[in-house]
């Protein structure tokens, strides 16, 4: 299938890399056309080798695909969700943000709320799925850390939407873990914050990953 990714930064690149490796096509949409074109050029060899395609869509064009990943800052996701609301109705919206404060040592959301729930409130007619916020962008380029496939923890209220996202994640060579309803995003966002605060003290350089062992 073809997935729309809104944003052309590090996470857009990482997530697009995995979807392309899984044989899915990707459309990149960013407010700066130059940035999306550059990302598409970077991803083209991977798309070519996996028989998929990577294309640019214009910021003002309607989003055509059933799955749309919002890959901007939390404030960018909110702003863009408001802007695109009618165009996202009925679609699966994958929300990946961590609502970090300016010093990256706390969240701007209150403990009884998450970025994903805020986006769902702005997009009542979309099926919002929280995913990918607990993995680091550069680890997505290979999908592994220390030879282990990344765990992707996923929260959402719509089981069909989660099932479709699980297929995408598995085909990308990653481990899908359903953590429950969308309000579990509160814990996922706190977990990601904790992971971020550990990078400096432990010298992990954003190349670590959370792993659920059993
Ligand atoms: N980096 C990670 O390892 C990581 C891990 C997990 C989750 N996340 C989350 O993933 C999201 C993206 O992170 P990133 O590292 O990819 O960031 P990034 O490299 O800075 O890229 C952000 C992208 O969002 C766009 N953007 C920001 N605000 C916007 C707005 N108001 N309207 C339209 N576009 C806007 C930027 O466009 P411009 O270039 O025009 O500014 C850029 O294309 C964040 O919410 C972050 O919390 C990141």
Image (spheres, rainbow, N blue to C red):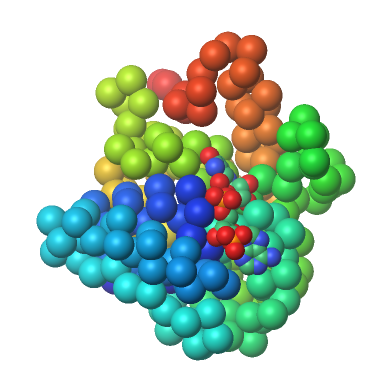
Where does the image place residue 66, in percent across and percent down from the top left?
43, 76
Q: Looking at the image, is 161 positioned above or below residue 42?
A: below
Left or right placement of residue 2 versus residue 190 in this view: left
Q: Looking at the image, is 209 positioned above or below residue 112?
A: above
Left or right placement of residue 50 versus residue 12 in this view: left
Pick the residue in front: 42 or 63. 42
Which of the 4 quarters of the picture holds residue 49?
bottom left
Q: Residue at x 36, y 26 (%)?
A: 145
Where does the image place residue 132, in percent across and percent down from the top left?
50, 46
Could you tell me if residue 134 is visible in this image? yes
Give the residue furthest to the front. Answer: 34
Q: Quadrant of the C terminus?
A: top left
Q: How many marks?
A: 0
Where does the image place residue 29, in percent across and percent down from the top left?
48, 72
Q: Quadrant of the N terminus?
A: bottom left
Q: Residue at x 30, y 62 (%)?
A: 41
Q: Residue at x 57, y 72 (%)?
A: 31
> Ligand 1 falls in which quarter?
bottom right
Left or right placement of residue 72 versus residue 33 in this view: right
Q: Residue at x 58, y 80 (%)?
A: 88
Could you tell me if residue 158 is visible in this image? no
Pick the residue in front: 131 or 71. 71
């Amino acid at each position: 299938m073809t997935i729309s990714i809104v944003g052309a930064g590090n996470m857009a690149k990482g997530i697009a890399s995995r979807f392309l490796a899984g044989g899915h096509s990707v459309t990149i949409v960013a407010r700066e056309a130059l940035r999306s074109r550059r990302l598409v050029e970077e991803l083209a060899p991977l798309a070519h080798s996996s028989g998929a395609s990577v294309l640019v869509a214009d910021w003002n064009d309607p989003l055509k695909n059933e799955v749309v990943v919002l890959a901007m800052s939390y404030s960018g996701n909110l702003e863009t969700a408001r802007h695109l609301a009618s165009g996202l109705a009925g679609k699966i919206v994958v929300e990946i943000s961590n609502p970090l404060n300016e010093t990256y040592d706390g969240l701007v959301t209150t403990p009884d709320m998450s970025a994903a729930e805020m986006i769902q409130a702005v997009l009542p007619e979309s099926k919002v799925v929280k995913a990918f916020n607990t993995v680091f962008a550069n680890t997505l380029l290979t999908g592994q850390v220390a030879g282990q496939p990344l765990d992707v923890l996923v929260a959402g209220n719509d089981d069909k939407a989660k099932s479709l996202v699980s297929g995408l994640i598995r085909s990308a060579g990653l481990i899908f873990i359903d953590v429950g309803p969308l309000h579990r995003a509160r814990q996922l966002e706190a977990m990601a914050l904790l992971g971020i605060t550990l990078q400096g003290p432990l010298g992990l350089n954003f190349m670590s990953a959370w792993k659920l062992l059993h």
